[in-house]
Amino acid sequence: MRLTVGGARFFSSTRAAAGKAGCNTVAPVHHTVKIDKNRLSPRFPGLQHSKLDIRHPGYKPTSTYQDRVAEYYSNSVQSDLLLINAQHGESRQPGYKRREWDGSSPFHLNRSLRKPKGSDAETPDIKPHSAANVPKIEAIHINCYVEQAKDNVNHAISALVQLQQITGVKPKPIYSKTNVLHWRVRAGYQMGASVVLKGRPMHQFIATLTEVVFPRIRMFKGVSNKSGDTLGDIQFGLRPDDVKFFPEIEQNQDNWSKTYGFHVNVVTSAQTDAEARTLLSAYGIPFYGSEKGVKPENVEY
Amino acid sequence: MLTFPIKSQIATLSRAVNGSTNTKYLISSLPLQFARGKRTKRTVTVSAGTQRIITQLSVISARKKVPRVLKLSNEDLIRHDTVQRAWTLFQREKRQQQDEQLSKQYDSIINALEDLKAVAPELYAVANKKEKGKRFPLEARIPVDYPPNKIWYYDVAKDESK
């Protein structure tokens, strides 16, 4: 009784330690802070550096060859696109946005906003064209879904290897997300592979596609003018027979008795699909069919 | 010989593989036992299809592909760093020049359109029209180091006989 008043020692200032009811409102952070234990260990000094440092074991030299596709873009395509897209007196065009309720019902007060008119989702504003937002290809997403992989996972592995051979980038396996009864697919099956190409591998892929593969596809018309997700990304597909024209596959036909088609999504920084098509035509990708908002007499070829 | 416990036999075998023991312990009537590190002949044969998948899996495995880390002396490191910085600086300057060039081009496009609007409004309306559906010519090529002598066959005609 002689230590402290009331018999309690105050080690902490929290209410619980003071013998009072209540809870701590400060959320604990010790398990939310991620610690990379490899970097704490003194055994691997190379890991202390960034991956761009030559001392890091994961260092990979990138600029080891001339990137002619990138040079073509910056030397000739970029300024042409600026001229094609430049408009005088442009203003920001608002996209589809969620709307307020009119307030005719008292229940409108806390209700979430109405859907945009004419669309399920909001769309971004279209900004005036300038020298800073000239469209360019940002990435190419390749997705290879193999239907036969539901019976034999070996097909998914072969598809993955095929994508790696074609692109030179390590793909990721894709898995079915849900059970689809009439496809006889269950969630968690490995069903193929996908890969995201950026930078030099992307340029290499475009060059191979437009110079080697497209010209050799029989009855090839081009990419449909109706393709696109309205936000400036263009999609097309390659059939298993078309894939055989990639030089990596063609030179090694004995090992590639079976090839797998895939979907290609070209992600561009263009704000509309029409601008994205203009950009892709510079790389030698032909388009066919009628384009929305373009009169047939104005089509150039 | 049978007085040796089995455990010591195994130990002798594995050491014998390393080549650092007396050979006299090797003479034994006991059957050979498994020893860690000793290579055994693969007896299981797989079908050609399975073998292809095994090969393909080894193609995508990262295990064999990671190259060794370069061993650089301090001088090498400084040299590498200097070259790297110079290259980055060169690229940055090039990029800045290009951006400047582009914005100048944009300004002159807009200036020209403004002048045209004041001088000839009907021409301005034509010049400022949106070029939807514009295409680069199909003949356009990404430049190569060694272009062919005849780049484009302009007089190509459809062969009617086929």
Image: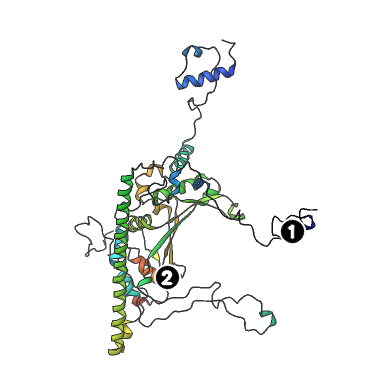
Q: Compare residues B36 and A55 and report the one nearer the observer.
A: A55
Nearest to the eye among marks 1 and 2: give it.
1
How crowded pointer 2 is (Cα within 10 Å; few <14, some 14-19, many 20+) is rated as: many
Q: Disc 1 and disc 2: Cα gap in Å?
A: 65 Å
Under circle 2, the secondary element is: helix
Give the letter of the chain under mark 2.
A
In the image, residue B123 sits, relative to residue A19, either above or below, namely: below
Q: Quadrant of the C terminus of chain A?
A: bottom left
In the image, residue A222 sits, relative to residue B30, either above or below, namely: below
Q: Quadrant of residue A255?
A: top left
| Rendering coords of residue A67 (x, y %) | 31, 57
Image mark count? 2
Give the letter of the chain under mark 1.
A
Task: Decide if residue A290 is in sight here.
Answer: no
Mark 2 is on which residue type? Asp
The numbered disc on residue A18 is 1
Q: Report which residue position mark 2 lands on.
A: A273
In this rendering, position of residue A182 left or right of residue A71: right
Mark 1 is on which residue type? Ala
**First reached walking from the N terminus: tag 1 or tag 2:** 1
In this rendering, position of residue B77 left or right of residue A109: left
> What colour scheme has been applied to the protein in the rendered image?
rainbow
| Rendering coords of residue A263 (x, y %) | 45, 58
